[in-house]
Amino acid sequence: MAKKKLVYIWSFRNAAADLAGQEIDYKGERRYMMSPLEHLVMALNDTPLGEAYSLQAVINDDDEMSPADRAKIGEYGFSCQSGQPWFYPPGLTVAGRPLNDLLCNIASTYRRLPLTAAGRPAAKRLFEDRLLEKLLSLEADLVVLDGLLVILDALVRPGARMERKIVNIHPGITRPDSPYQRRGAYATLDALYGARSQKVVDWNTLRTAPAPHITRTGASFHYVDNGIDSGEVILDVLGTEIEPDDTIIELRWKNFNHSLFPALTQGLAHLAAGHQSAPGSNGSGT
């Protein structure tokens, strides 16, 4: 059976916030912050996933001309350089090919425009058109989003050529009926507040209100639609215990290792086996 052609899309600025590829402080120790991409590459090299998928490209949407993006990415820079930190070991290979050779930039330059700018919708459509053109040229069978800090629209509308071919790995449970549901860019921080019996009701001011106490969080592997982490869940894992004294980076490390990495590899295996979605979660996400 021919391998499915896999394309990975992420934002460097999100990986930089996670300190991907670096040693972090973890409860008085030092631990390595592996990125989901590095974990995926290891799985493709060392597990049966490599018999099902071939990684064709790793696309990022970061805008090198944007002062905001440059500030968020910081010392990593926009390409792997000697003597600078990078998001994974510089010599990392996948199926014998240098991972750095698969990197490709399609910048979401529309973000330079104000939200209310008349030309912003057309500029965003142009970005998605360029992305679609690249995916079609790669003959992508499946696209995995990881920390892509833009919301796709035309690419994932009903009837679009990439509908149900784009999935997302999210560091939170996304099922609407789950008490552990945490969607959006602040999912990990939101879970941390939940462990303190609080819920952030205004992310601009971090104003909180009392909320049901939670002790766990997880990760979801789901189809991408036009909403924020609202697509149909393929598989989720609720495997991360939250301690009230966790820092955001400590909880992020735990959630990657205990929930997100398993959700990513198990979700890909689930699709490779021909399943489209799972009736329940792995780890009681409801």
Image: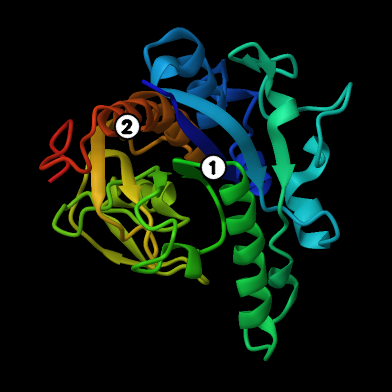
Task: Identify the image quadrant of residue 66.
Answer: bottom right
Residue at the disc numbered 2: 263
Amino acid at the residue labelled 2: Ala
- Residue at the extreme bottom of the image, as rendered: 118
229 or 186: nearer the viewer:
229
Q: Residues within 10 Å of mark 2 (few under 14, many from 20)?
A: many
17 or 97: nearer the viewer:
97
185 horizontally vs 18: left or right: left
27 horizontally vs 1: left or right: right
Residue at the disc numbered 1: 139
Which of marks 2 and 1 precedes in the sequence?
A: 1
User: Residue 12, position in %: x, y?
Assistant: 67, 44
Amino acid at the residue labelled 1: Glu
> Is residue 197 placed above or below 119 in the rendered structure?
above
Residue found at x 50% / y 34%: 6
Q: Which mark is residue 150?
A: none
**Number of marks in picture:** 2
Q: Residues within 10 Å of mark 1 (few under 14, many from 20)?
A: some
For residue 153, say whether it is visible: no
99 horizontally vs 28: left or right: right
> Is residue 96 placed above or below 127 in the rendered structure?
above
For residue 177, say whether it is visible: yes
Residue found at x 83% / y 54%: 64
Q: CA distance from mark 1 to mark 2?
A: 25 Å
User: Residue 30, position in %: x, y?
Assistant: 58, 16
22 or 114: nearer the viewer:
114
> Is residue 158 placed above or below 15 in the rendered structure?
below
Residue found at x 35% / y 31%: 268
- Residue at the extreme right of the image, as rendered: 82
User: Residue 214, position in %: x, y?
Assistant: 21, 45
